[in-house]
Image (cartoon, helix red, strand yellow):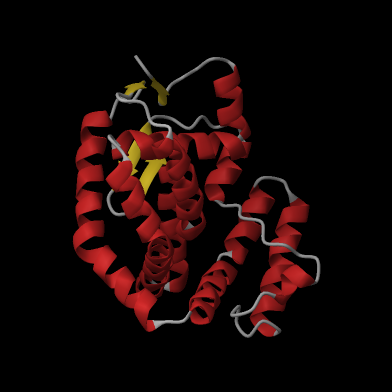
Amino acid sequence: MRLRSLCRLAACAALLAAAQPATVRAAGDPFEAVNRRIHTFNRSVQTKVLGPLAELYLSATSAEIRRGVVNVLANLNEPITAVSGLAAGNARLAANAATRFGINSTLGLAGVHDPAAAMGYPRQAFGIADAICSWGVPSGPFVVLPLLGPSTLRDAGALVATSVTLSQTLGSDVYFAWSGSDLFVGYAQLHRELERIDAESLDTYAVYRSAYLQRRAAVCPTNRARDSAGDTDGGLETP
């Protein structure tokens, strides 16, 4: 879930940081004051807690072990992709995710390996937020979630709904252990790149806001339609 989002966000943020103008202001960011405070809190947690833990994890594990952990977490997300695909009316996507889960949970040793990809079933990330987007629900204002980072009202709502459902289905202890591991592993893989972006950016909040909104616009038809119509809500302007 968050692992894939972090990967894409870091890639977008790296490009934006390199081309960032001297001053950047938001056009339609009604929660900016609160968002910036949460962003500052998140960065503090990353620097003081997550960063040292990530370095310890990277130094104590091999690349092969880390790849296996990432594969296991991704495999656990396949049922969510299947349900989300059905909710979006995309039976082919749902079938692909269900098939991947069956193959990788057995032949892939609980998802440690990804034989499904070699058999013609590639990983296709798709979540509840993507399904809701396919229904034409607008993204709403940009928000920053404590510890979880950039989002929008629509995507945050989808995350809450998913979290509540899985917590009730699996049990809160199991769900929070799973989601916490997913978040940490994603951050551990990217934290050095994120630290570089933070060090080189004049305004990290603006960089991450723009990166998230651009990434979502690239995959969400509703967001693309809004941008094509000239609605810059939540976008960026340069004076």
Write down the quadrant of residue 173 in the picture: bottom left
Q: Is residue 152 visible?
A: no
Residue 98 seen: yes
Whether residue 129 is situated above or below residue 178 in the rendered picture = above
Residue 74 sits in quarter: bottom right
Compare residues 179 and 8 and report the one nearer the observer. Answer: 8
Please give left or right for residue 116 compared with residue 58 in the image: right
Query: Residue 216 versus residue 85: which sits nearer the camera?
Result: 216
| 234 is higher (above) or lower (below) than 75 | above
Residue closest to the far right: 120
Q: Position of residue 85 (x, y in %)?
A: 67, 52
Residue 76: % across, % down: 55, 70
Q: Residue at x 54, y 74 (%)?
A: 67
**Residue found at x 36% / y 52%:** 194
* Quarter where residue 203 is shown: top left
Q: Would you place residue 60 above or below residue 234 in this image?
A: below
How far across and down, in percent of the image, does residue 172 sit?
36, 70
